[in-house]
Image: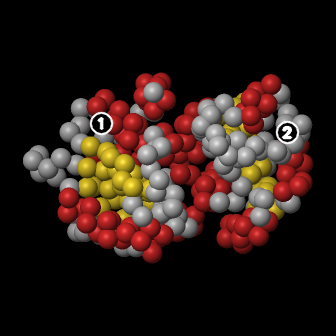
Amino acid sequence: MSLSKIPLAGVIGSPIAHSKSPQLHGHWLETYGIAGHYVPLDVEPGDLEEVLRALPKMGFVGVNLTIPHKEAVMKIADLITDRATLIGAANTLIFRADGKIHADNTDGYGFIENLKAGAPDWNPKAGPAAVLGAGGAARAVVSSLIDAGVPEICLSNRTRVRAEQLKRDFGNRVTVVDWVQAGNMLDHANLVVNTTSLGMIGKGALRVPLDGLRPGTVVTDLVYAPLRTHLLETADQMGCVTVDGLGMLLHQAVPAFERWFGTRPEVDRATRTAVLR
């Protein structure tokens, strides 16, 4: 990259004004003294391909993607990693020097790194995981849990057919449980993960019975607004090890920032503070 060209990156979604990614990447650019910029880009689904093809010509080295573009970009990208293919969605694009768009998914990586940081004693092989939800985030979580060696993943979703699709895609380690029985998954779970938006500010409550939680069970919620969801508050009171969802956002950004700007950033207390400002 020539010194005269300032590298640009950003996040594409619709809507996008709520995204914390510009604060996160802006903090790292400042911390490491990198002359680059990271901007929010509100792009309608019908304009996505045209925008992506134009961005490299404007000095963009890559972008993140969020709702509603993570699946759609799979039809546009020239090169797709195995893990993005398995998950069926991409959250990170790298614009290569030869003009090709390279798509990856770092959500599962961010999820596992957040668990390692927040629950260092968690042993994936020690028992089953209970996963609530079967959307794009759940696909990344299930994929990463299988890679980590979790022996069984009990999966429950309000629409059972979506959970069944995940089982078809990820195989016999996934067991589907009816939503009305979701509370029963917690009795034997070594790890409990909420991948739904239930419990988020402005969304419905997560009404799954939590009385099956046991002291020492690791409980994490991908929702980070509020930072302490009802699930995490209840799990805390029951002696569980709780991990909030903000860390997943921070850790999934690390490989992207490194690819775009050439420096591997650290997720530390200052990073969390910058994003929560």
Check disc 2: other Cα within 10 Å, few if <14, some if 14-19, many if 20+.
Answer: some
Q: Between marks 1 and 2, how big is the CA–CA gap?
A: 41 Å
Position of 161 relative to 253 (above/below)? below
Nearest the eye: 126 or 153: 153
Secondary structure beneath label 2: loop
In percent of width and height, residue 216 lies at: 79, 31
Residue type pointed to by label 1: Leu
Question: Residue at position x 74%, y 29% from top?
Answer: 233
Secondary structure beneath label 1: helix
Query: Considering the image in quadrants, where does the C terminus appear?
Result: top left
| Residue that lies at the very extreme toward the front in this rendered image | 202
Q: Quadrant of residue 206?
A: top right
In percent of width and height, residue 250 lies at: 48, 39
Question: Residue at position x 65%, y 56% from top?
Answer: 138
Residue on which the image places disc 2: 210
Residue 208: image tag: none
Residue type pointed to by label 2: Leu
Q: Quadrant of residue 144?
A: bottom right
In percent of width and height, residue 102 lies at: 37, 65
| Residue that lies at the very extreme toward the left in this rendered image | 4
Is residue 115 toward the left or the right of residue 180 in the image? left
In percent of width and height, residue 270 lies at: 43, 24
Q: Is residue 208 visible?
A: yes
Question: Residue at position x 58%, y 45% from top?
Answer: 111
Position of 15 relative to 25 (above/below)? below
Q: Is residue 192 visible?
A: no
Question: Residue at position x 37%, y 48% from top?
Answer: 40
Residue on which the image places disc 1: 29
